[in-house]
Amino acid sequence: MKIAIVINTTWNIFNFRMGLLEALQSDGHEIHAISPADEYVTHLVDTGIIHHHVSISAHGSNPIKDCALLMDLMRLYIKIKPDVILHYTIKPNIYGSLAAAILKIPVVNNVSGLGSAFHRKTITYYMVQLLYKLAFINADKIFFQNNEDRNFFVQKKLVRSAKTDLLPGSGINLRKFHPVHYQKGSPFVFLMVARLISDKGIFEYVEAIRHLRSKGYQAKFQLLGAFDAKPDRAVKPEMIDAWEKEGLLEYLGVTDHVQEIMSQSHCVVLPSYREGTPRVLLEAGSLCKPIVATDVAGCHHVVKDGCNGFLCKPMDSIDLANKMQLILESPEEQLRKMGENGRQLIETTFDENRVIDKYRQAIFQFDIPLPFSLQKRVQSLTDTITVG
């Protein structure tokens, strides 16, 4: 079979989906990746994946650009003739599904989180719901990463429950992420890994640090993650500079070696407002790190309060500081036990092989001679679409 995967960054494919794609390749499938070209394309090509560039804006909703994306995806689907398409992230889920529906191509969608569009009931909130409802009418399978998100889509009648299923996030490769023996070091190192946007709770993290500093705690606070281009949510570089000059935190930039940095930390923090199943927490758990995270969808599926970390109230810097203080004051043996509990949870619930098996089951139903022969349909569409 030809299987296409469509996502808004090639970086995302390389860092989070390669286990799945390599498993599908080992099953004999031909894999086509459709995403904006970046420095990670060569990594995909080196593994035998065929890459196709498409321009996808990760932010905002511009009707002209979105219509262009729909047409671009149709052209690529006509060119590639995939037997099934895997969609990830909002715009591929919506416009990729619409394009596939027109061409009668089976799709498997993955809603990895509701995103910022669902945090506030603006026009965008209602518009995105309508687009999802239209796009998912003909979807064959829609994976969600937590029950709250799935129930939201079902209750809003955006999808039919029978088409949905749950995944343990993107899963974690337990052969790659080995447990690390926990030792409480000095200085104690807190690490937050996230995109630099307000929805990840970065401002709460900074205020929590201020609160802990005012109480005399001299731990080391680190921040790792990429800047974001969306101005209304972005943490600006000058803010980071000011926080560093104030002595609050150390900004580590971006890296492809998160595992190495996380291994040197003593606690991972994620005060996000909402998640699907946050990859950073899966990695932290697999490395036996205690965690402080918000008690919100996604986070509380990975962190069990008092077991492998602590949960704090969302958007509450004082409660976050209090939970970080609990970590600081916990004896090494208790933190080690938390880390071991986290590793056990990851092994039993979030193994990447569970994700791969779910996708294999979803794809298996299409692994038969399909009435896809697009010849006549493609010819008629090609007459009206200028193939770039």
Image (tube, rainbow, N blue to C red):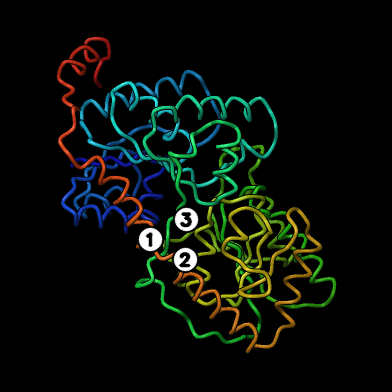
Residue linked to disc 1:
354
Q: Position of residue 276 (x, y in %)?
A: 54, 50
Mark 2 nearby-residue class (10 Å; few <14, some 14–19, many ≥20) = some
The part of the image, by quadrant, that contains residue 105 is top left
Q: Position of residue 319 (x, y in %)?
A: 79, 63
Front: mark 1 or 3: 1
Mark 3 and mark 2: Cα distance apart in space: 10 Å
Q: Are dots 2 and 1 in contact, CB under 8 Å?
A: yes
Q: Position of residue 35 (x, y in %)?
A: 35, 39
Residue at the image point whose x is 22% and y is 48% from the top: 49
Residue linked to disc 2:
349
Mark 3 nearby-residue class (10 Å; few <14, some 14–19, many ≥20) = many
Residue type at mark 2 is Thr
Mark 2 and mark 1: Cα distance apart in space: 8 Å
Q: Earlier in the sequence, mark 3 or mark 2?
A: 3
Residue at the image point whose x is 63% and y is 44% from the top: 234
Residue type at mark 1 is Arg
Front: mark 3 or 2: 2
Residue linked to disc 3:
169
Q: Nearer the viewer, residue 14 or 210?
A: 14
Q: Is residue 162 above or below residue 357?
A: above
Residue at the image point whose x is 71% and y is 83% from the top: 330
